[in-house]
Image: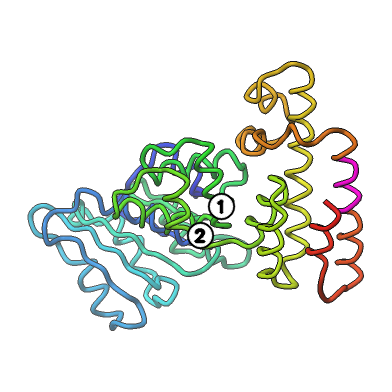
Amino acid sequence: MATFSVWAKNRPVRRVAWVCGPQSALVAEVVAAHRDGAPDGQAVTLYAGDQPERDIWDLLLSCPVSGGRRAVVYGAEMLARTGNVPELAEAPELGTAFAVLVSAEDDFPRDGGKLAPHLAALQASKNGQLIRCCEPGKLDDRIALVASWWPGASPVFAHSLLDRCGSLDEAWQACRTARLAGLKPEPAMAAAVCPRSPAGDFADCLIAGDKTGAMAAARELDFGEIGAVIGLTAFRLALAEAVADGLRDGLSPREAAARAPGPRFAALQVSRHASRYSSQRARRCREALARADAAQRSGAPAGVAESLVAGW
């Protein structure tokens, strides 16, 4: 049993995989790895719930034609005849038939706290694998993943893209669009393929000193986004202040970003604006953030983001 991050280190492909988890982009990565190299005409997609289960198992358990078969079954959580899963992995005559069973559940089903019997058997099989597609816990790992989806993307660019998109799923869709269109990893191209994020736009503009842009982004924020906006802006302010301290010590922007606490990629992103944040300026900005946070927590219905811009 492995998370996507563990599986992705070597991306092993076994005859039968049960895949689940909340990150659809990562599920797509696993499916693509299993589909690579499928013989012509032998890539099959099936949908449990839309097709009779008997027909699905009849195909999966049939001997593949010369060259093998690569099948993907979506909606695997709806399959009732799960006792067939171990057979699918162990039957010698199915040695060139590969299958990925994709469940829409966030985690593997369990029985009395233990893995469901068909998954326990699959886990024990040398021909089987269980992969849970959850978001990598470390920011650096998420950034590296996004960079791998857009050829030529640097870590700094990938961090900016992830920040703009707001989630791995959105970043995966943006990178897929960019690849299909043959776009280069440049800021203008990122803006073309990424959904707009008012929260990210607000923080970017405010840290850059673009109050007009920040006000425009503030008008697009929903009430539920204000807390995240305050947190994101406070995080970037802390990085900008740390980089500014390094600049005052005679370091280059890159050296100062490397010394700053937190992800280096994020520090590099704010380093171009760090010189404007003296200790006094940073203190005033923190005070404005504290006032905005207090207003948001007290339930102020409107004007919190605008007041933060005014006090910046």
Viewer-closest of 113 and 296: 296
Q: Residue furthest left?
A: 66
Q: Amino acid at mark 1?
A: Glu
Q: Which residues are magenta?
A: 282-288
Q: Position of residue 19 (x, y in %)?
A: 43, 59
User: Above or below — where is 221 with respect to 68?
Assistant: below
Viewer-closest of 230 and 215: 215
Mark-to-mark CA distance, 1 and 2: 7 Å
Q: Residue furthest front?
A: 212
Report the disc number at residue 68.
none
Q: Position of residue 246 (x, y in %)?
A: 76, 23
For residue 284: magenta? yes
Is 254 positioned to the left or the right of 284 in the image?
A: left
User: Above or below — where is 222 with respect to 306?
Assistant: below
Question: Which residue does the numbered mark 2 point to in the structure image?
Answer: 23
Question: Which residue does the numbered mark 1 point to in the structure image?
Answer: 135
The answer to which of marks 1 and 2 sits earlier in the sequence is 2
